[in-house]
């Protein structure tokens, strides 16, 4: 009987020690595993940012941060994509030929995008660095022309951009909105800050 009492107490001690060790290993593993994620400092310096766009519905926009800047991801409706060519005659740089900053080759098209429905741009006006506001709906609105096709309005000095981030003529902003390097990992995952697969 005394041997079974000793065995039971040893077993209890071993189980308790094992549980404490497992908990301790968990506390050590969490910071170790999370150290593989880019730090906030690394993200600010330009580390790529992966974004889940699965919940973005047509006509909606989301904003993420990359290099300390707001990056817009707009999912355009088929009607919005179809309306883009109507703006060309009113735009200062419809083909993104200006070189204030490089426009990736895959964004030198009517929609300035890889996939026509998705538009990715740095949400900073090329005039003085303000952040334009959404004016995504078409039609007459305050501070906008009656034939407005949808886009963005910079409230600081009145620059306007279409739904591909192209600036209208005779506005203070000298250039289109910047298109950052980006690529799709899948239909629902987007990486901003990188456009080549390693």
Image: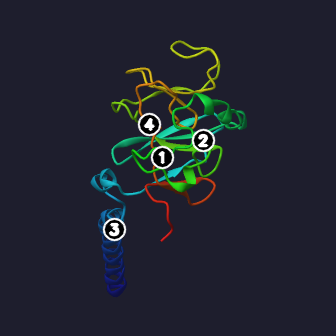
Tell me what residue is drawn at x 63 percent, y 50 percent: 115
Q: Quick check: 119 left or right of 44?
A: right
Find out whether the residues at labels 1 and 2 contact each other: C-beta distance under 8 Å.
no
Tell me what residue is drawn at x 48 percent, y 46 percent: 179
Q: Quick check: 157 left or right of 112?
A: left
Q: Quick check: 8 left or right of 83?
A: left
Tell me what residue is drawn at x 51 percent, y 27 percent: 169
Who comes first in sequence, dot 3 or dot 4? Answer: 3
Marks 1 and 2, how far apart in space? 19 Å
Q: What residue is shown with label 2?
A: 56
Res 147 → quadrant: top right
Who comes first in sequence, dot 1 or dot 2? Answer: 2
Tell me what residue is drawn at x 57 percent, y 45 percent: 112
Above or below, 18 relative to 114: below
Q: Secondary structure at mark 2?
A: loop
Name the mark nearer the viewer: 1 or 3: 1
Q: What residue is shown with label 3?
A: 29
Q: What residue is shown with label 4?
A: 175
Toward the viewer: 68 or 111?
Answer: 111
Name the mark nearer the viewer: 3 or 4: 4
Q: Which mark is residue 179?
A: 1
Who comes first in sequence, dot 1 or dot 3? Answer: 3
Who comes first in sequence, dot 2 or dot 4? Answer: 2
Residue count near mark 3 (Cα–Cα under 10 Å), binned few <14, some 14–19, many ≥20: few
Q: Secondary structure at mark 3?
A: helix
Name the mark nearer the viewer: 2 or 4: 4
Marks 4 and 1, how far apart in space? 12 Å
Q: Position of residue 124 (x, y in %)?
A: 40, 35
Marks 1 and 3, how far apart in space? 38 Å
Above or below, 5 relative to 164: below
Residue count near mark 4 (Cα–Cα under 10 Å), binned few <14, some 14–19, many ≥20: many
């Amino acid at each position: 009987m005394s041997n079974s009492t000793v065995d039971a107490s040893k077993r209890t001690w071993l189980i308790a020690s094992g549980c404490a060790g497992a908990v301790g290993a968990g506390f050590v593993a969490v910071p170790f595993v999370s150290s593989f994620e880019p730090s906030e400092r690394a993200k600010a310096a330009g580390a790529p940012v992966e974004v889940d766009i699965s919940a973005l519905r047509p006509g909606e926009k989301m904003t993420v941060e990359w290099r300390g800047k707001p990056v817009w991801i707009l999912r355009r409706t088929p009607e919005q994509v179809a309306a883009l060519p109507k703006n060309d005659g009113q735009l200062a740089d419809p083909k993104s030929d200006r070189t204030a900053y490089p426009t990736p080759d895959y964004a030198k098209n009517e929609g300035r995008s890889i996939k026509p429905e998705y538009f990715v741009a740095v949400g900073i006006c090329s005039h003085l660095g303000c952040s334009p506001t959404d004016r995504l709906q078409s039609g007459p609105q305050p501070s906008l022309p009656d034939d407005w096709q949808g886009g963005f309005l910079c409230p600081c000095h009145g620059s306007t951009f279409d739904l591909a981030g192209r600036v209208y003529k005779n506005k203070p902003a000298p250039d289109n909105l910047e298109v950052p390097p980006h690529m799709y990992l899948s239909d629902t995952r987007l990486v901003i800050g990188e456009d080549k697969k390693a």
